[in-house]
Image (cartoon, rainbow, N blue to C red):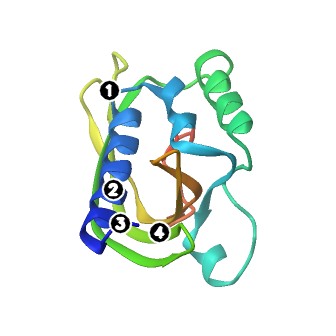
Amino acid sequence: MMNNRELREAVEELLHAYVQCIDDDRLEEWPNFFTEACLYQIMPRENAEQGLPIALMYCDSRGMLQDRVVAHRKANLFAPHVYRHLVSALRVTGQDQGVVTARSNYAVFRTAQDPIQYGTTEVYSVGEYQDTIVFVDGVAKFQEKVVIVDTSRIQSLLVTPL
């Protein structure tokens, strides 16, 4: 069993590796941050506060996450862009029988890569990560990752995971 400091470091490393994977456009690796049976959803704050289960993006298995990546690479049409995540205010909020819960704030900056808007950077999304983490063979994995976006107004197509 890990002490509080080791646990926090493991959770922080998972979060940082997760956002770096997205920012580096290594999306084929993204599903590996999750357990086989998992939940990933992006939900507007107003829905979360009212207990409404409607999400902007919903995946309930690693296979669905992999399908999301394939759709991103082969089917979705969108202006090329890069993300840059900032994660802060990490708090491990619970630990019970190997299941860890954590909350953190995030901000995602989106920089256009298309010829017309090349280099234009905008604040794309801000909100909170609500994570449930388990250790599989000693490796921290998300069992649930609920992304609570502060607004349901998305400036452009939501194709890349947050």
Give coordinates of residue 97: x percent, y percent: 57, 73
Of residues 115 and 130, the one nearer the viewer is 130
Of residues 62 and 83, the one nearer the viewer is 62
Report the side of 20 relative to 5 (left or right).
right
- Give, as a three-letter code, the residue at label 4: Asp
- Give, as a three-letter code, the residue at label 2: Ala
Residue found 34% across the figure and 41% down from its top: 17
CA neighbours of label 3 inside 10 A, class few (<14), some (14 to 19), many (20+) = few
Q: Earlier in the sequence, mark 2 or mark 4?
A: 2
Q: Are marks 2 and 4 in contact (CB under 8 Å)?
A: no
Q: Are marks 4 and 3 in contact (CB under 8 Å)?
A: no
Q: Which residue is mark 4?
A: 150
Q: Earlier in the sequence, mark 2 or mark 3?
A: 3
Of residues 84 and 155, the one nearer the viewer is 84
Residue 117 image label:
1
Question: How far, Cα to Cα, is label 1 from label 3?
Answer: 47 Å
Question: How far, Cα to Cα, is label 2 from label 4?
Answer: 27 Å
- Tell me if residue 90 comes above or below residue 85 in the rendering: below
Q: Earlier in the sequence, mark 1 or mark 2?
A: 2
Q: Which residue is mark 3?
A: 2
- Give, as a three-letter code, the residue at label 1: Gln
- Name the mark nearer the viewer: 2 or 4: 2
Give coordinates of residue 57: x percent, y percent: 66, 50
CA neighbours of label 4 inside 10 A, class few (<14), some (14 to 19), many (20+) = some
